[in-house]
Image (spheres, rainbow, N blue to C red):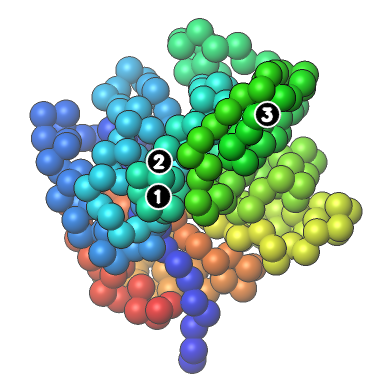
Amino acid sequence: MERPQLAFGYNPPTGNRQIERVDPSTFAADLDRVLSVAAPSFESLWVSDHFMTEDRFRLECWTQLTWIAARFPGPLLGTIVMANSYRHPPLLAKMAASLQYLSGGRFILGYGAGWAEDEYRAYGYDFPSARTRIAQMVEGIEVIRALWTGGPVSYEGQHYRLTDALAVPVPQPTPPIMIGGDGERVTLRAVAEHADWWNAMSRPMDVLRRKVTALEAHCSAVGRDPASIVRTITFVAFLDADGPAARRAAGTRLQGEVVAFAGDPAALVGHLAALAELGFAHVQLVFPGFPGTADMELFLERVRPEFA
């Protein structure tokens, strides 16, 4: 049976995550080695945006992404996703335009309203309501898109103000903006109105189907073709030739509101096919075997060819 085409991205760690513990003394070398396997085989490479999680070793998103851009000239490059509050949007517009210029037009701006309250508080950022953070994100997108025209730009919003701001170089091509999140009333409305791409959270399939339906309803309300939004999804893949072993490794991560995948290659093929039926076109994967590559290489050998 002919499978739908899917594009795949790899989301390496920026340091320690709940599913990975890294050795700071070897992390740069480990990251370089693993990305040397991933870069020729994945359409895109993605970096998450956090400063700290439980006081563990972690690099800053933009610095790591720039390092990756310089070392690996082939794949698309994306943030998954940047918290609007962490960088003043006009500055981020300039950063993105600069990286787009230096990378030869490979950048995708993954953007979100932010959620990690403990991280906000620790670094001295205000943490307003979710509705306010989403409003700030929307204004941030308006500011960024305006500055990507080169300027001069004047803007008077509730949260951000510009006066005759210039931003050259103008990024070529204009980077897609991918909004991350799936709140059905406000976030998905923002996706329908402002996003080029959507990054969904890994939910149980019935919940994910409901999120897709909600996005399509918002698109209808604003007069937009839902097919004009590239649907992407990120999940952790506990992949093993022995399916029960993969599920044992995943443990409780198979339950809850946000779930991982765990199983053998055939099961992952089926899972990805179900996502494609929901209209997802780009899948960003986390492989918890880092700094090993056995799980990634199993994916490339036995799963990836099914969707070429």
Amino acid type at image mark 1:
Leu
Direction bottom: furthest residue:
1
Amino acid type at image mark 3:
Val
Work out whether 175 lies above or below 114. Answer: below
Horizontal and vertical percent position of residue 69: 31, 46
User: Label 2, on which residue?
Assistant: 99
User: Label 1, on which residue?
Assistant: 77
Q: CA distance from mark 2 to mark 3?
A: 21 Å
Work out whether 166 lies above or below 296. Answer: above
Q: Is residue 115 visible?
A: no
Local secondary structure at mark 2: helix
For the residues labelled 1 and 2, say whether their Cβ atoms are less than 8 Å apart. yes
Disc on res. 6: none
Q: Residues within 10 Å of mark 3 (few under 14, many from 20)?
A: some
- Of badges 1 and 3, nearer the viewer stands 3
Decide if residue 89 is on the left or right side of residue 207: left
Q: CA distance from mark 1 to mark 2?
A: 10 Å
Amino acid type at image mark 2:
Leu
